[in-house]
Image (cartoon, grey):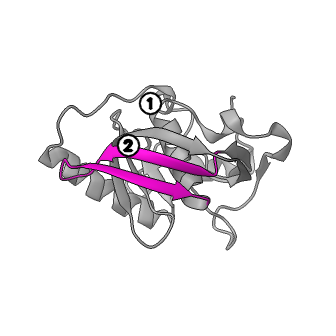
Amino acid sequence: MDVIVPPEWEHLFIRDTHRSIVKIPDPILRSKAKPVSRVTERHRLLVDNMTNIMKKASGVGIAAPQVGVAERVIIVSPGNKAIALINPVITRSEGEQVGEEGCLSIPGLYGDVKRAFLVEVEAVDKKGNTVTYEMEGFAARVVQHEIDHLDGVMFVDKADPATLHWRDPDAADSDAE
């Protein structure tokens, strides 16, 4: 889905040294990210940088394409701890939930998206170890949203169009992913 940014929200889409997150319509957001063949120091630095960018933006997740890197790396932080997942794959999903989502790459736009309630994710951590996480509820929503980014899919592609709406992303009730 193409997103037309209303004039009153265009200031949120400026990208500079203070706002380093890639915004629509940058083509990297619609590209399929490449798998990481071997975790290197560069990837560990990327994970640290992405975590800092996500926290500075008050996000709960971020994918490498959102910082201009077309590799399969995500950070999810649905609670207090940020988790780095390299080459994440959902190996199991159960149930269903519908909830509101936003995105750091489309600031100000929100809408309801149907997702699995529980997912099992296999990945590699920043040390190169294979890890498996079972996530449910909000954590499952966040990881699915970020993995979609790695395949060039944005939340607006899955959102119920009738629920899409613009609001201030700095409002207290916002959860940007």
Looking at the image, which is closer to me, 25 or 72?
72
Q: Mainly helix, strand or loop, the magenta region?
A: strand
The answer to whether 18 appears left or right of 144 in the picture is: left
Which quadrant holds residue 108? bottom right
Q: Which mark is residue 64?
A: 2
Is 59 contained in the magenta span? Answer: no
Image coords of residue 160 (percent x, y): 79, 40
- Residue marked by disc 1: 28
The reply to whether callout 1 and callout 2 are in contact (CB within 8 Å) is no
Amino acid marked by disc 2 = Ala
User: In what element is the residue under mark 2?
Assistant: helix
SS label for mark 1: helix
Residue 14 image position (x, y, % from top left): 52, 48
Label 2: how many residues lie within 10 Å, few (<14), some (14-19) or many (20+)? many
Q: Position of residue 91 (x, y in %)?
A: 46, 38
- Could you tell me which quadrant the N terminus lies in? top right
Whether residue 89 can be seen here: yes
Name the residue rendered at 30%, 30% in the picture.
35
- Residue mark closest to the camera, 1 vs 2: 2
Task: Give the left or right position of residue 152, taking residue 172 as reference.
Answer: left
Determine which of the numbered discs, if any, sits on residue 20 in the image: none
In-image side of 77 versus 44 (left or right): right
Label 1 to label 2, Cα distance in Å? 10 Å
Magenta residues (range): 116-137
* Identity of the residue drawn at 86% across and 41% down: 162
Q: Earlier in the sequence, mark 1 or mark 2?
A: 1
Q: Amino acid at mark 1?
A: Ile
State whether residue 72 is above or below residue 108: above
Residue 3, visible in the rendered structure = no
Position of residue 23 measured from the top left corner of the image (x, y, whole percent): 52, 42
The quarter of the rendered structure image containing the C terminus is bottom right
